[in-house]
Amino acid sequence: MIPTEDASARKREIEEKLKQEQETLSFIWESLEKSDQLTKGMVSILSSFESRLMQLENSIIPVHKQTENLQRLQENVDKTLSCMDHVISYYHVAKDTDKIIREGPAGRLDEYLACIAKIQKAVEYFQDNNPDSPELNTVKARFEKGKELLEAEFRSLLMRYSKPVPPILILDAIGGDEDMEVQEDVMLEHLPEAVLQDIICISAWLVEYGRNQDFMNVYFQVRSSQLDRSIKGLKEHFRKNSATSAIHSPAVQAKRKETPTKKAPKRPGKDDVLDIEIDSYIHCISAFVKLAQSEYALLGEIIPEHHQKKTFDSLIQEALDNLMLEGDNIVSAARRAIVRHDYSAVLTIFPILRHLKQTKPDFDVTLQGTAASTKNKLPALITSMETIGAKALEEFADSIKNDPDKEYNMPKDGTVHELTSNAILFLQQLLDFQETAGAMLASQESSSSASSYSSEFSRRLLSTYIYKVLGNLQLNLSNKAKVYEDPALRAIFLHNNYNYILKSLEKSELIQLVAVTHKKVESSYRELIEQEIQNYQRSWIKVTEHLTERNIPAFLPGTKLKDKERQIIKDKFKGFNDGLEELCKIQKGWAVPDKEQRDAIRHAQKRVVSEAYKAFLQRCANISFTKNPEKYHRYAPELVEEMIDKLFDTSA
């Protein structure tokens, strides 16, 4: 059993807790009631606010819509006014641009083009919106007038500022110093930069808006004229300067061997005027290539790409045709020279042809894209020159063989014949053009190997040709020598000519060139020379034969000779004296131009005669064959030698 006191305490405790819970519950109910009241108040306020907002919205929205409509109307009005102003401006374009269009684009190209752009827009507007309006015709006419004046300005600028390139500048441009490590290209400025930019601008406009290609014709006509005038000016420069004063500029002075200043050696009868003409033509060929390249670079900035090749082709025709015509005239002159048998004149072709062939690669590159007829002009000229050159070479060889034996044309002193010196000179001049001459001969070969001939093939042809000329010359000289009645003079003549040929071959590269196909040519000439010396020496037999022991009687010193025996000795002295005097008199007027050969012939003859004479005198020393020995013993051995030393000396 729980004690009573504890139960009472427990009861009181529970009652107190219950009381506290009741108080808390009462507080909660009171709070809920207050919250309900507040909620009802808030709901009432919100309901009132919502009602007011609805009233406000119903009032504002119509006003907002009305304002928006007004703004849209305002914008439409502004746009309409702007469009009206824009449209009205098209009606005023003709009037607004009249002054500028009439005055033209000179000096204010940008402003002028802006004006044209306005007119062009007006044309487009009226075409799209009012194609039947008179205003369209007005602005169209104004546009055409503007285009016409632009074309006129294009022509005017080209003609006013396009000038021939001065000869000195051309010569500097085509020159070059091979000793310089870096060679500077000389730039040719055909138009001032500002003018060029205006021309480019007009060209671009005409291409895009002008719908007219006439300006391209204007361009090639103007530039074609200047190109031709530039080359003619260079030609005139050469005509005005002599061969010595035509040293033009530092660049030209330092040209390499293959450049145009390499000229042919002097030819028989050739004057300085011809030198200048050859040099002029060669320089003009180089000038054409350089100027044409420069023209193409200029054209590339002005003419549309798809019209450039055709325009360039037209532009170069006049200058190119004139050069080719001049080349044809050179060929014709060479052909006439061949008819006259003036083969030295044909040598003018060699330096020109060599330069044309050296320049051909640059020609081909420069003329890329031009018509086939344009490209073929230079090859045709080269072929023509090679053909006439080969004909000249062959006819020259024949002329050497067939040169007539004219007695009055033979040298009286047996010296070198003009035919020999001219033939050798002609051959020596070929040395400067070995490749050119060889190619000429090869071009006429019909064999399959000739179609793709090598430099070695053409060199062998030239070697064979020179050997043929030498053979023809030798044959002709041998025939000419027969004109001389005196066999000794005949021998001296042939000796002089053969010796001249050999020495000339040795002094030049001819000997090496002939040796390509005929290695023994040198020894052959030496044998011929020695043979003619021996033939000459036979002329002295009629002198020395009197000094032989034949018919001299045997005798003892002091023995008295019979009249017949004395007469034999007298006849021998007389025969020797007369023969010596006669030969020395005749042969003193003969010529042996080569001092070395002259001295050798004299020395050999002096030795033979002197030895025989001394031996004869020694045998006759103690013989009394006459009372007047000085009558027969006219010449001491020393005097005989002096007389022989004066052979071939007209001044003695």
Image (cartoon, rainbow, N blue to C red):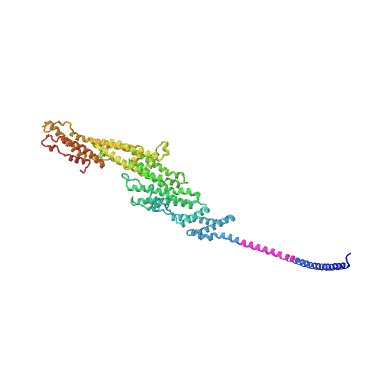
Q: Which residue is more in the foreground, 611 or 354?
A: 611
Left or right, 633 with reference to 465? left
Span of residues in magenta: 53-81
> How many marks do you count on the picture?
0
Q: Is residue 586 visible?
A: yes
Residue 578, position as x, y percentages in the image = 17, 36
Q: Is residue 242 above or below residue 635?
A: below
Q: Which residue is more in the foreground, 402 or 322?
A: 402
Q: Is residue 551 above or below residue 642?
A: above
Q: Is residue 485 visible?
A: no
Residue 127, position as x, y percentages in the image = 57, 55
Residue 97 lies in the magenta-colored region? no
Residue 113, position as x, y percentages in the image = 51, 57
**Quadrant showing the N terminus:** bottom right
Left or right, 631 with reference to 492? left
At a point 71% along the width and 64% down the height, the residue shown is 61
Residue 121, position as x, y percentages in the image = 56, 57
Q: Main secondary structure of the magenta part?
A: helix
Q: Which residue is more in the foreground, 171 or 11?
A: 11
Q: Which residue is more in the foreground, 133 or 19?
A: 19
